[in-house]
Amino acid sequence: DAGVIQSPRHEVTEMGQEVTLRCKPISGHNSLFWYRQTMMRGLELLIYFNNNVPIDDSGMPEDRFSAKMPNASFSTLKIQPSEPRDSAVYFCASSRLGDTQYFGPGTRLTVL
Amino acid sequence: GIQVEQSPPDLILQEGANSTLRCNFSDSVNNLQWFHQNPWGQLINLFYIPSGTKQNGRLSATTVATERYSLLYISSSQTTDSGVYFCAVIRNAGNNRKLIWGLGTSLAVNP
């Protein structure tokens, strides 16, 4: 089993640029989660999907953030325009409904 | 909302020592997980344990759902056990899938 796959692993960009983070969940998992982790705020849930449908996006910080899940095997988190305060590690996780969540390796984003 | 409290916040051990980490939660839950975040940032699922006891090698966990706490036991600790241990729960409410996280216990195991 390949586990949750995220790309890129590291991203350095300049303020104002668009950033797209990608996630492939574990095959057969129905739920997908996007988290952000910073020293100041710890782990925050941004949004999660059940069966490709967004269920709770209350953690999305503002309109600059958007997430999509066009099919069961792919999701994107987009930041446009990016700001230095968006610098963080972004994790994707997946699970079967109600079961254990498995995390990807994360994308370390630095916005200069 | 549900509160998740972990203790101790920090722990330093000598290699070979045993330890117990605690997680208290303020409401009934239908999902409780323990995670280890290693020094490289990887979040690794240790246990899915909404109730009962499980063991995996030197690690074991017990959740007493009626008393709203869970314990993670680490025996014969090794330097590779260093990192942050998180407890996370899902409140027992319908189709809710949102994990609520504790602040973690930061463990350092010295050789």
Image (cartoon, coloured by chain):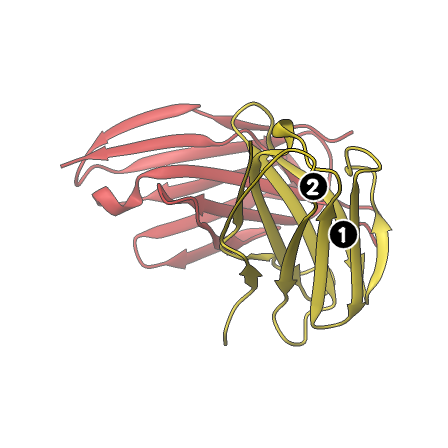
Chain colours: A yellow, B red
Task: Establish if A27 lies above or below B26.
Answer: below
Crowding near the residue tagged with mark 2, few <14, some 14–19, many ≥20 C-alpha atoms within 10 Å: many
B95 or B68: nearer the eye? B95
Q: How many marks?
A: 2
Q: Is residue B94 visible?
A: no
Q: Quadrant of the N terminus of chain B?
A: top right
Q: Is residue B19 visible?
A: yes
A91 or A80: nearer the eye? A80
Secondary structure of the residue carrying tag 1 is strand
Q: What is the x, y in percent for residue B33?
A: 56, 49
Q: Say which residue appears at 85% left-offset and 52% top-offset.
A: A55
Which residue position holds label 2?
Answer: A45
Chain where mark 2 sits: A
Direction from residue A58 to residue A109 in the image, left or right = left
Which residue position holds label 1?
Answer: A48
Residue A17, image quadrant: top right
Q: Amino acid at mark 2?
A: Leu
